Image (spheres, rainbow, N blue to C red):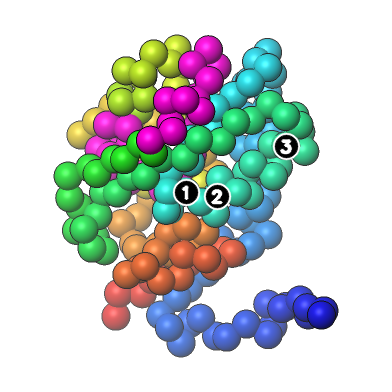
Amino acid sequence: MTSEALSSADMPNLSEQGLRVLFDRETVFSAIDRVAAEITQCYQAFETVNLVPVITGGMQFAAALLTDLERRAPGKWIVVPVFAAAYIQDSVISEPVIEFPGTFDARIRAEAPVLVLDDLLDSGTTMQELMTLISKKGIGSTKLAVLLERARPRQVDLKPDFCGFELDSDAWVVGFGMDNEQRFRGLDGIYLLDST
């Protein structure tokens, strides 16, 4: 069985669904490549680095980034995901909900640094809580990489150590892990959702 590649010309018109391209596929993968180079440089002295993708939003970014990282430094990266949520529905922020899988402590390499991976840094409340909980597990170094950071004042003192893009807007974005009512998460670019 063969599979035909879907070109961008073959894709449905996303503007009919209220989506406008913010960063296309090529731009997103270029940013991921840049971030991977920065991360590899930062951790070059370490034999092992724990990557902690935040599920569900961080899956797509983490997968693309991991592929790039493995090309640059094969065998260095241990993946140990966590579950975290900050929204009870789109644009309605709730108390952070963080779940560590039962095998997290057994799989994490305590002597190695941790790099948390997520799609979006927004208010920072959930991420700050997650970073604190990981640090309490005895990890010496915990850093953060995000695909997109909302450039805004936060109630918490948190900035990503590695970032693909900054967005100086409160516009709702979807694609590459970010969603609207659980939809559009798998788009290979980042789109603005028109509020009309």
- The answer to whether the residues at label 2 and label 3 have Cβ atoms under 8 Å apart is no
- Point out which mark residue 58 bears: 1
Position of 159 with respect to 165 (left or right) is left
Q: Secondary structure at mark 2?
A: helix
The local secondary structure at tag 3 comes to: helix
Return the residue nearer the eye: 26 or 185.
Answer: 185
Q: Quadrant of residue 172?
A: bottom left
The amino acid type found where label 1 is placed reads Gly
Residue drawn at x 24%, y 55% is: 87
- Which residue is drawn at the image coordinates 17% and 50% (left, top)? 94
Q: Identify which amino acid the numbered label 2 is placed on.
A: Phe
Image location (x, y in percent) of residue 142: 44, 22
**Relative to 178, 154 lies left or right:** left
The quadrant of the rendering that contains the C terminus is: bottom left
C-beta proximity under 8 Å, tags 1 and 2: yes
Question: Which of the pair 110/27 is nearer the observer?
Answer: 110
Q: Is residue 172 visible?
A: yes
Residue 117 belongs to the span the image colors magenta: yes
- In 3D space, how far apart are the residues under numbered discs 2 and 3 (Cα atoms)? 14 Å
* Residue marked by disc 2: 61
Residue density around tag 1, few if under 14, some if 14–19, many if 20 or more, within 10 Å: many
Q: CA distance from mark 1 to mark 2?
A: 5 Å
Residue furthest out toward the right: 2
Q: What span is colored magenta in the figure?
A: 102-130
Query: Secondary structure beneath disc 1?
Result: loop
Amino acid at the residue labelled 3: Glu
Question: Could you say where residue 31 lies in the image, as x and y percent from the top left?
Answer: 62, 47
Mark 3 = which residue? 70
Q: Is 129 part of what is drawn in magenta?
A: yes
